[in-house]
Image (cartoon, rainbow, N blue to C red):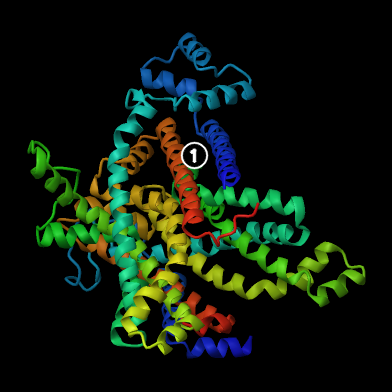
Amino acid sequence: MKQASRVLLRNPGGMIGIAILVIAVAVALFGPLLFPTSPWRMVQRPFLPPFTLSGFPLGTDALGRDVMAGIIYGARVSLLVGLISTLASLAVGIPLGATAGYFGGKVDDALMRFTEFFQTVPSFALAIVLVAIMQPSIVSIVAAIAIVSWPPVARLVRGEVLSLRTREYVQAAVVTGQTNWWIIWREILPNALSPVIVLASLMVATAILLESSLSFLGLGDPNLMSWGYMVGAGRTVIRQAWWITVFPGIAILVSVLALNLIGEGLNDALNPRLAKGGR
Amino acid sequence: MISFIAQRIAKAIIVLLALVVLNFFLIRMAPGDPAVVMAGEAGAGDQLFIAQLREKFGLDQPLPVQLFLYVKGILSLDLGFSFRQQMPVSKLILDRLPATLLLTGTAFAISLAFGILFGALAARFAGTWADTAITIAALIFYATPLFWVALMAILLFSVTMDWLPSFGYETVGAGYTGLPHVLDVAAHLILPATTIGLFFMATYARMTRASMLEVNRLDFVKTARAKGLSDTVIQRRHVLRNALLPVVTLAGLQAGTLVGGAVLTETVFAWPGIGRLMYEALLQRDYNLLLGVFVVCSAMVLAFNLITDLVYRSVDPRIEFAS
């Protein structure tokens, strides 16, 4: 692990990614302290262009709300939704994949058919339907993203478990009479972790994109300011006020890019075998 | 081969049935008693009318019977009725389907052609500035939300430069026919198709590059080089050909993602396809229509996956489709 972190630190893309992410997290955590006014409050005249008034560096939107404040509060929503929905997908995908890979046979067959079904269904369309039916809220958005995102986790974990379960140390654990769940949890999963970490970091990026797309379509949590919502709200006035759509979009782009860079850096660091040929 | 095809089709049918069942329960989960909603749409709320509606649509039957009726309806292409639009859901979808197929088909072709081209160039000139430029561009487009690319395209090419139309399928009221009509639709198609295309282009370029670099290290490439073939010939005839399989596999699997891209892009460009229809259904909370579009999209993705599966089998006999 130590060596892996050293490799990651030498990877320029990964370093850039980490730097951006650290800034984004800092903004999400401390930004609201610097901008205590709610991003929903009308604070200036509508359509104030950016870089004209010192208090409002990114201008205001069609209702006179501060774009900068929106981006700062939106960082919380994006990062939080990305993180929690990824954790939720892992919570579904890891046990499912581990069960399928460890027990094999009919259990494996049934679970994998189930997984394939969710992989066939167009994921964004399913997410839209789920959020629309459950009514938009932060809980339904996280649930919908988790429901459409877990299958790759299950498939990855299944593959890893499948190859690890025949190893000698696992056999040894079986001989010593450990229970199946103990073996999976203590012997197999810790060794299957590194590809899961790589996948998870990329999934956070995808989740942020999904959340922003849902909010853009008007399926965001109505009580929370988010980047996708801002772009969606600015869409109709793009001819008069480009800045309302441009800045939140850049925020999404930069965060997703950072997470992808980190994911690739982690991949090179944790799977050095794969990294050599250039991905 | 025949048994393989039969097996695949049987599997697709099972998935389709599962999908229809899922859809049925999703509709039942949607907020509001359907009969009350229908009565409300029709502008009459009295109990007798609601009871009549319930009976007419079988909503007074036990759940398994309702499910049976629903599956039966879908098999005869009856996807229910949209009370907001006062039209059968299947008709609404059929009317919009050609526009979506045109858009996604064009986007798919653009992304595959240019994705492979740029990926191959990056691999051919690996380590040079051209490779770096292509890799960075691919990274950026891969991370950009589609709806935002769409808006930026409008801002740049319609608002600022005024080169291309920013919304719709054709110039309303122009009444073009023949070639001018085709050109008019093409002009409207460029921005939305490129928007969807860019994201997938980035994916395919990255994949092609990685795959070609991998094939480059294989022994038969050394043999070709030892035979004295020129680098260009080796790359084009030997490396690219062998590197394409994973790319095409990935492309085949991405039909589902293409649907999502269509929803966002059609929404921004007011492209009259089923993605836009889904957005309209969403705005009006028209659940019958929303789920109708969903089930049709899923069925199309399923069919597309099935076809790609079968095509691979005939293209590359090495592919083992055991079980």
Residue B245 position (above or below residue A141): below
Residue at the image point whose x is 39% and y is 52% from the top: B258
Looking at this rendering, what residue extends furthest in the top direction?
B48
Q: Position of residue A180 (x, y in %)?
A: 83, 63
Looking at this rendering, what residue extends furthest in the right direction?
A176
| Amino acid type indicated by mark 1 | Ile
- Is residue B148 visible to the viewer in this orientation of the structure? no
Horizontal side of residue A49 vs B229, given as left or right: left
Q: Position of residue A63 (x, y in %)?
A: 24, 53
Q: Nearer the viewer, residue B154 or A66?
A: B154
- Is residue B284 visible to the viewer in this orientation of the structure? yes
Disc 1 residue crowd, few under 14, some 14–19, many 20+, Cα 10 Å: many
Residue at the image point whose x is 14% and y is 57% from the top: B158
Residue beneath label 1, please?
A133
Q: Position of residue B252 (x, y in %)?
A: 44, 55
Residue at the image point whose x is 39% and y is 49% from the top: B259
Residue at the image point whose x is 24% and y is 49% from the top: B269
Local SS, label 1 = helix
Q: Position of residue B1 (x, y in %)?
A: 57, 48
Residue B182 position (above or below residue A197): above
Q: Nearer the viewer, residue A23 or B295?
A: B295
Horizontal side of residue B185 vs A84, given as left or right: left
Give the number of marks.
1
Q: Nearer the viewer, residue A239 or B104?
A: B104
Horizontal side of residue B122 vs B169, given as left or right: right
Q: Chain of mark 1?
A: A
